[in-house]
Amino acid sequence: MSWKTVSIGEITKVVTKGTTPKVFLDSGVNYIKAEALNGDSSLNSKRFYFIDEQTHESLRRSQLDDGDVLLTIAGAQIGKCGYVKDSYLPANTNQAVGIMRLDKNKAIPKFIYYFFKQKKIFQLIQGLNSQAAQPNINLTMLKQIKLQIPKHSIQQKITSTLSTYDDLIENNRRRIQLLEESARLLYKEWFVNFRFPGHENIRIVDGVPEGWKTGCASDILDVMSGGTPKTKVSDYWDGEIPFFTPKDATDTPYVLSTEKTLSEEGLKKCNSKFYPKNTIFITARGTVGKLNLAQKSMAMNQSCYALKAKAPLNQLFLYSALEASIAQFKSRASGAVFDAIVVDTFKFIQLITPPKILISKFTEIAEPIFTQIEILLIQNQKLAKARDLLLPRLMTGEVEV
């Protein structure tokens, strides 16, 4: 098989970076920051921002086209890549993202995306400027990156093979989003709009159905803390115990795995408990208010809180209630010098407690929804693992297609 060595600069028509507007909106033209480059062929639309049409037109340098390959070129996650599909357009991106617009006579755009998706290429880019206080690579460095490419027909076969995995992942992701929305709407309909089963026969007293209780979050949940063992003691790390930090927070209900793990000895030297499945983690510093259910038992660092429902509430009801109230947490946190949630924050968050029988009815409907979300997330994790094992072998010609 004949593969040719080229540089990114040789096969692109445009290598540039985006620009940042002054104002973002609640809806409008998609604006894609580096945080939306999740490394999958589908960008993470939950992380999109929005601008108006006039701003989109004025930021011509950052306007995206179908087939653009995006690469994070500034910040801790330099090297994360993304691929622009027509369904995301019109769209712009910011200055932390490099835009590669391929000469399609020389390379298939998605083949170049898969080149950057390789773990070894991500690590290469991470190392290009690892000594800087704010890691970054400039456009000249990006253009000089070399790769080997086969003829177009082989590129097409490779991208088609890998896209099969991505298409299945994307289909599951859409199903997850629909399931999430159904659970969210169910909670809102019953416990925000008060259109629950039998509501016609219940009076509203002081703004809530008669017999319901209103109080602060700290009255209906336990707030537990975490900690980090000494990072320089190697015996504490790389064990079998998942160690949740804000970096591990996901945009789905469950977190399945963590970047770091602890040993049994590390857990003993840590202020965190080994929290069981379905413990709710809420990020308390930095990007505050990210909520996740632990899909398995996990320890946790000090930048989060672990939350456990008090009877008659359960974890799924509490997760839904907190998700519906997350704006209250973010509002409270933004008043601090540094955005943060503290234990006392939970004293100021108002939540309702409906009768036990209604919580049980909600759970009967919600539990299968969350179970299906968990199953689909595990499927996606397995698909991504299989794709990533195959990826470097295809991209080097070790496995022929």
Image: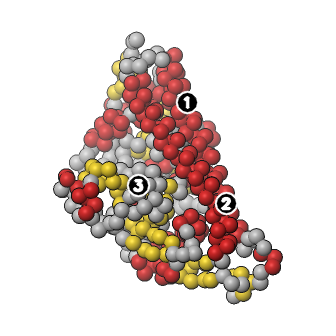
Badge 2 is on which residue?
365
Say which of 138 and 5 sits in front.
5
Separation (CA) of disc 2 from disc 1: 33 Å
Q: Secondary structure at mark 1?
A: helix
Local crowd size for mark 2, using a 10 Å CA cut-off: few (<14), some (14–19), many (≥20): few
Q: Secondary structure at mark 3?
A: helix
Q: Residue at x 48, y 80 (%)?
A: 218
Query: Mark 1 belongs to which amino acid?
Result: Thr
On the image, which quarter does residue 351 sit in? bottom right
Q: Secondary structure at mark 2?
A: helix
Give the x, y percent position of residue 316.
Answer: 56, 64
Q: Is residue 187 visible?
A: no
Local crowd size for mark 1, using a 10 Å CA cut-off: few (<14), some (14–19), many (≥20): few
Q: How is the image coloured?
A: secondary structure
Residue with the most extreme bottom position: 206
Residue with the most extreme right position: 200
Badge 1 is on which residue?
164
Q: Nearer the viewer, mark 2 or mark 3?
A: 2
